[in-house]
Amino acid sequence: MMHISEFQMKDVINVSDGKRLGNVDDIDINVTNGKIQAIIIGNSGKMLGFFGKGEEIIIPWRNIVKIGEDVILVRIQQQVTETIEPEK
């Protein structure tokens, strides 16, 4: 058995590209059957949520490859968009 607080302490790593996605912010539970539907990774780029809400990554439970002692390995195809700031 694992407590949600232990689950939230683990780093979430995408095995498709080896990138760290962040930590579990929330979970989506099907209240009918009590099963976890997805984990939700919040954007750690925002400072404690004070400066607006960032993008969330929703990872379906079926995409979790392994839950280890320190990490949660997931497999997702993440589309990365970069913003280029104009030179000053």
Image (cartoon, rainbow, N blue to C red):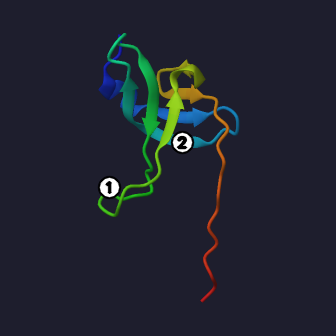
Above-or-below relation of 64 to 13: above
- The dot on residue 49 is 1
Name of the residue lying farthest toward the front: 32
Above-or-below relation of 78 to 87: above
User: What's the residue at 60%, 76% (across, down)?
Assistant: 85
Q: Would residue 13 be visible to someone looking at this image? A: yes
Decide: few, some or many residues near mark 1? Use Cα within 10 Å; few <14, some 14-19, many ≥20: few
Where residue 83 appears, as percent x and y from the top left, is: 62, 67
Where residue 57 appears, as percent x and y from the top left, is: 50, 41
User: What's the residue at 46%, 45% (across, down)?
Assistant: 56
Looking at this view, is 76 or 20 the one in front? 76
Q: Quadrant of residue 15?
A: top right
The disc labelled 2 sits on which kind of residue? Answer: Leu
Looking at this view, is 50 or 23 the one in front? 50
Above-or-below relation of 8 to 62: below
For numbered disc 2, what is the local secondary structure?
Answer: strand
Q: CA distance from mark 2 to mark 1?
A: 17 Å
Decide: few, some or many residues near mark 2? Use Cα within 10 Å; few <14, some 14-19, many ≥20: some
Where residue 74 appears, as percent x and y from the top left, is: 59, 28
Which of the image's four quarters has the N terminus?
top left
The disc labelled 1 sits on which kind of residue? Answer: Gly
Which of the image's four quarters has the C terminus?
bottom right
User: What's the residue at 50%, 36% (across, down)?
Assistant: 58
Where residue 54 appears, as percent x and y from the top left, is: 43, 55
Lateral position of residue 54 relative to residue 79, left or right: left
Q: Earlier in the sequence, mark 2 or mark 1?
A: 2
Lateral position of residue 87 relative to residue 41, left or right: right
Q: Would residue 64 be visible to someone looking at this image? A: no
Looking at this view, is 24 or 28 the one in front? 28
- The dot on residue 14 is none
For numbered disc 1, what is the local secondary structure?
Answer: loop
Label 2 sits on residue? 21
